[in-house]
Image (cartoon, helix red, strand yellow):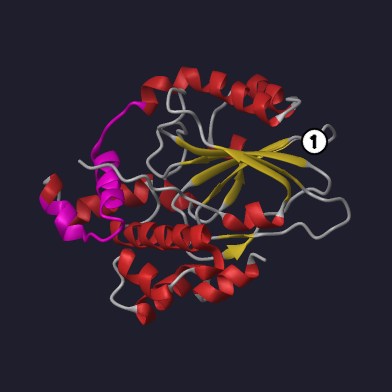
Amino acid sequence: MKTFNFFPAQPEINYKMGNYVEKKPLEKSITHKSVALFYQFKTRKGELNSFSLIPDGSIDLLFCCSEKKPSIFLWTSPNQRSESIDLQDDCEYFGVRFYPEQRFIELKYSMRELLGKTVSLSDVMSIDHSVLEQIFAGKSFEERMHLFEEFSKRYYPNMNHQDLIDYSVKKIYSCKGNINVKQLSIETGYSDRYLRKKFEETIGFTPKRFSEIVRFQNSLATMIFTKNNYNPLDVAYDNGYHDQAHFIKGFKKFADLTPTQFMYNLQ
């Protein structure tokens, strides 16, 4: 199958948080098949520290590396653009964003139950707290990435796992989200109903909804790359929308804003 590099993005974090840095895992690293991005930012003391989340189908782990009140929580993709999680003032945050098909995190609940929620990691996953304490105490972005890579080695067998969802998700990526459930059903040999059930358990979304999110995220990536000089008609056709009106309607469905309004909001 031809590989298409889907990248789940949360641009408001980048544009609105202070001291923002990010880095993708190296291809030779243990996490590159499951982790899309490592990132870090700092909230400002006494200021309104907020951003909105948009649908990306992913899971994020966010470490609040505060000496007085360290914490770690997990957030999952919302159905549409929503207000941000509560953040501590004057705190450095280290984040890990996982691809939707990741095999690193084994949760106690199905993604259908967790979709669009922010929860304490200890409530949904069994984890070695001594490792978390090392990450909290990390002195730099690079050190925290290294510690997380070391922590990930024990999960290596899970991250190499291949199954129906992994295959189907990669097929959706290769089609840039322009595929229907019937096509997936024929290609995989599983019924529409079974595919929907497995997607909701593992990804949280139905295959149709997830495909729409992939197309939305691909459109957003094009817009951000070209900044305010993007051509809506070109974006529409490049990502499988019928026309400009169809693109705007599809974008607003997830961003709660038109493409132009969304880009203006990032300024």
The part of the image, by quadrant, that contains residue 1 is top left
In-image side of 113 versus 177 (left or right):
right
Closer to us: 68 or 224: 224
Question: Residue 224, how many percent across, how many down?
Answer: 52, 60
In-image side of 174 versus 120 (left or right):
left
Q: Secondary structure at mark 1?
A: loop
Question: Residue 130, how many percent across, how many down?
Answer: 67, 19
Residue 18 visible to the viewer: yes
Closer to us: 51 or 72: 51
Residue depicted at 25% across the width and 35% down the height: 163
Question: Residue 54, how many percent across, how many down?
Answer: 53, 60
**Other-residue count near label 1 (Cα within 10 Å), few / some / many at <14 / 14–19 / ≥20:** some
Q: Main secondary structure of the magenta part?
A: helix
In-image side of 20 versus 205 (left or right):
right
| Residue 163 belongs to the span the image colors magenta | yes
Residue 257 visible to the viewer: no
Name of the residue lying farthest toward the right? 46
Q: Is residue 63 above or below residue 211?
A: above
Closer to us: 205 or 50: 50
Residue depicted at 44% across the width and 72% down the height: 231
For the magenta stretch, what is the residue range? 160-186
Q: Is residue 110 above or below residue 241?
A: above
Question: Residue 177, how many percent across, how many down?
Answer: 30, 58
| Residue 69 belongs to the span the image colors magenta | no
List the residue tagged with mark 1. 66
Residue depicted at 57% across the width and 70% down the height: 262
Closer to us: 182 or 196: 182
Q: Is residue 89 above or below residue 105?
A: below
Residue depicted at 43% across the width and 58% down the height: 217
Q: Amino acid at mark 1?
A: Ser
